Amino acid sequence: MEDITVIITRIQKLLKTSYQNIGDTLIAGGVDNMEKYKYMLGQAHAYQYISQEISNLLTKKEQNEVKGENVVDLRGKPKGDTKD
């Protein structure tokens, strides 16, 4: 399991570095036409999206699931309801 953690950490670092490099290039005026700007902006969005998805996968979320469906408890009593 440690091997996967190391790989994921390296991927996250690579994504962060690549995203930072694009930002630095854009800020420094390294874009000479709109096509290149749009391409780099697309790359930046992709890096952010992938980073967020990895983060979401690593975050443990407490969900009640039955066969892939969320379970909602509808038996809760509304406030002020004294009937049983």
Image: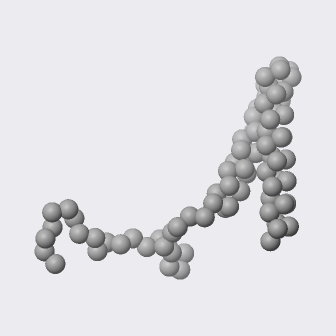
Q: Residue at x 75, y 34 (%)?
A: 41
Q: Residue at x 67, y 61 (%)?
A: 57
Who is closer to the viewer here, 72 or 7?
Answer: 7
Horizontally, residue 39 falls left or right of residue 53, namely right
Residue 41 visible here: yes
- Estimate the x, y position of residue 74 in percent, counting from the top left: 31, 72
Horizontally, residue 58 falls left or right of residue 47, namely left
Who is closer to the viewer here, 48 or 38?
Answer: 48
- Estimate the x, y position of residue 82 in percent, counting from the top left: 13, 70
Q: Quadrant of the C terminus?
A: bottom left
Who is closer to the viewer here, 5 or 72?
Answer: 5
Residue 33 visible here: no
| Residue most extreme to the front | 2
Horizontally, residue 55 falls left or right of residue 71, namely right
Q: Is residue 2 above or below residue 54?
A: below
Q: Name the quadrant containing residue 29.
A: top right
- Estimate the x, y position of residue 49 in percent, counting from the top left: 69, 48
